[in-house]
Amino acid sequence: MNNEIAVIFDMDGVICHTNPYHSLAFREFFAARDLAPTDEEFAEHMFGKSNSYILSHFFKRPVAGAELLEMEQEKEGLFRKIYEPYVEPITGIVEFMSDLKQNGVKLGVATSAPYANLELILSKIDIREKLGSIMASEDVKKHKPDPEVYLKSAENLSVTPDQCLVFEDSFSGITAALNAGMRVVGVLSSHTKEELPPCNLYIDDYTDLSYNKIIELFNS
C-alpha cells in the first residue's frame, strides 16, 4: 500500500444521529396512509436502506418512477422540517476529520440520502471544505448494499479500494463497503455489534479516534 489513504463516511447515523428523525418523518408519512410500522420493522427495513426499498417493502408492491419521486420528496421534506432545529454532529467527528485532513488523509461522504438532506447537514456542520468527494443517492444507479457509491467515491479521491476506510452504521452500508473491498468501522448508533457484519473496529462515537489509530487499522 502506498502512503495515501482515504476515509469515507456515510451520513445518517455516522455524521449525525438522524435515524430517530427519519423514523418520525416516516411515521407521519405512513400514518397519513393508515400504516403503522413497528420499531422492529423500522430497524430491519429502514436504517441504511434506499427509499425505493423502504416504500416498496411497507406498501407491499413496487414503488418506482414518478410515484417514487413524489413520495420521496414528501417524506424527505418532512424529515428536513422535523430535523432542521436539531442538526448536531456525533461527538468528536469534526475534530477527528480535522486531524485526518491535517495528516493528508483524503475524505469523502457517501450517502443513500438525497442531496437536499446532505445540504442541510453541510449547512449546519462545518466539514464541507474538508471533503474531496461528496456523493448522494442521485449519483448512483444501484444503492447499498451494492458497492457502487463507495467505488465511485474511491475514483473521485484517486485511490484504490484497499486504500479506503469506510465509517458505516447499517447492515447494508457495511456490506456495500465490504463488497467494495474496503476496511470498515462500524458506528454503533443504530445497531448493536451483533446485528452488523464483521468490521475492523466498532465505535460509539469519535472521541477516542485519531489519525494514528486509523494508520494502525491499515497496518494490522
Image (cartoon, rainbow, N blue to C red):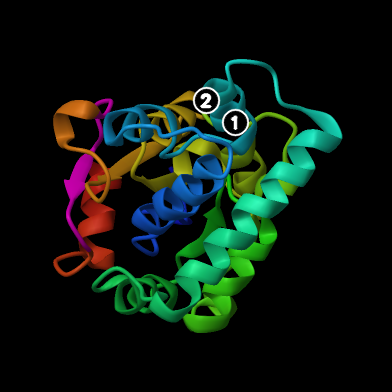
Q: Is residue 208 above or below residue 126?
A: above
Residue at 50% x, 76% y is 84
Instruction: Examine the rendered structure and indicate whether residue 99 appears above or below residue 47.
Output: below
Tell me the residue that label 2 is attached to: 58
Quarter of image, res 98:
bottom left
Q: Is residue 92 left or right of residue 66?
A: left
Left/right of residue 23 with respect to residue 194 in the rendered view: right
Q: Position of residue 176 (x, y in %)?
A: 49, 30
Left/right placement of residue 154 relative to residue 198 reads right
Q: Is residue 149 magenta?
A: no
Q: In the image as oriented, which residue stretches furthest toward the top?
A: 61
Give x and y (percent) for residue 204: 17, 55
- In this orientation, which residue lies closer to the viewer: 21 or 219? 21
Q: Is residue 216 left or right of residue 182?
A: left
- Residue 17 visible in the snapshot: yes
The front one of 211 and 87 is 87
Residue 37 in picture, x, y percent from top left: 39, 32
**Residue at image x 58%, y 16%?**
60
Please tell me which residue is depicted at 32% across the width and 34% down the height of the picture.
43
Q: In the figure, 63 relative to 157: above or below?
A: above
Q: Secondary structure at mark 2?
A: helix
Q: Mark 1 — residue?
A: 55
Q: Nearer the viewer, residue 217 or 32?
A: 32
Task: Name the image quarter holding residue 18.
Answer: bottom left
Q: Which residues are magenta?
A: 196-205
Residue 201 belongs to the span the image colors magenta: yes
Q: The C terminus is located in which quarter?
A: top left
The main secondary structure of the magenta stretch is loop
**Residue 5 seen from this side:** no
Q: Residue 32: which quarter of the image?
A: top right
Give the Cα separation between the discs numbered 2 and 1: 5 Å
- Identified at 59% across, 23% down, the residue is 59
